[in-house]
Image (cartoon, rainbow, N blue to C red):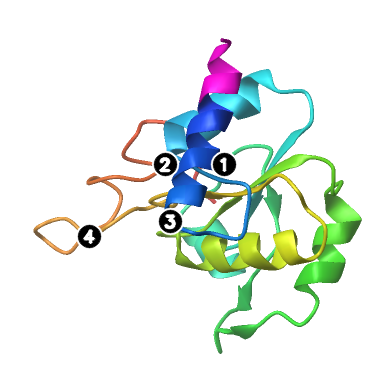
Amino acid sequence: MSQNNEILQNARSRALGQGLPYAGVVTPSEAWTLLQSLPNVQLVDVRTHAEWQFVGVVPGAEMIEWKTYPTMANNPHFLVQLKAAVDPEAVVMFLCRTGVRSHDAAILAAEHGYTAAMNILEGFEGDKDAQSHRGSKNGWQAAGLPWTQG
């Protein structure tokens, strides 16, 4: 079995095991592997403009706010923006700060025909460490995956 197939099967098993309505759940490292090797895959970063600018971004990610800064109101145009940017047939992996907004985005995408919608566990910054700082315990940054400062 190829590494991609193994990742996709594990992602699906995690989602089924948790009773999730979308296709899968991947770790940041698994998401990076899929981004590098699958032809029809897209990472959608659903954090806010402020987070992209001040915290950092994954190169090549599609950036669509789930909630808008500073009010953190739901983005009423999210689905329209997603449909304009991402093919519903693509493997689409959602990323946020810790995996909560991306979970919600994956649910909405799955409800609207994205059959390979996935959530990236731990998010970009991950959980807080003992000093209440993010970015070192788990998540995209802590995994040492590519990102750039805004």
Q: Is residue 4 magenta?
A: yes
Q: Nearer the viewer, mark 2 or mark 3?
A: 3
Toward the viewer: 113 or 16?
16
- Cα separation, mark 4 vs mark 2, equals 13 Å
Q: Earlier in the sequence, mark 2 or mark 3?
A: 3
**Residue under the point 56% across and 45% down:** 24
Residue at the spot of label 4: 128
- In contact (CB < 8 Å): disc 2 and disc 3: no
Return the x and y of residue 9 as percentages of the image width and height.
Answer: 54, 30
Count all numbered tags in the image, as a single digit: 4
Horizontally, residue 42 falls left or right of residue 135, namely right
Label 3, residues with CA under 10 Å away: few <14, some 14-19, many ≥20: few
Label 1, residues with CA under 10 Å away: few <14, some 14-19, many ≥20: many
The amino acid pointed to by label 1 is: Val
- In contact (CB < 8 Å): disc 4 and disc 2: no
Return the x and y of residue 133 as percentages of the image width and height.
Answer: 21, 59
The amino acid pointed to by label 4 is: Lys
Q: Secondary structure at mark 2?
A: loop
Q: Nearer the viewer, mark 3 or mark 4?
A: 3
- In contact (CB < 8 Å): disc 1 and disc 2: yes
Say if 35 sits above or below 120 in the image: above
Say if 119 sits above or below 50 in the image: above
Give the magenta range: 1-6
Residue at the spot of label 3: 18
- Cα separation, mark 1 vs mark 2, equals 9 Å
Label 4, residues with CA under 10 Å away: few <14, some 14-19, many ≥20: some
Q: Earlier in the sequence, mark 3 or mark 1?
A: 3
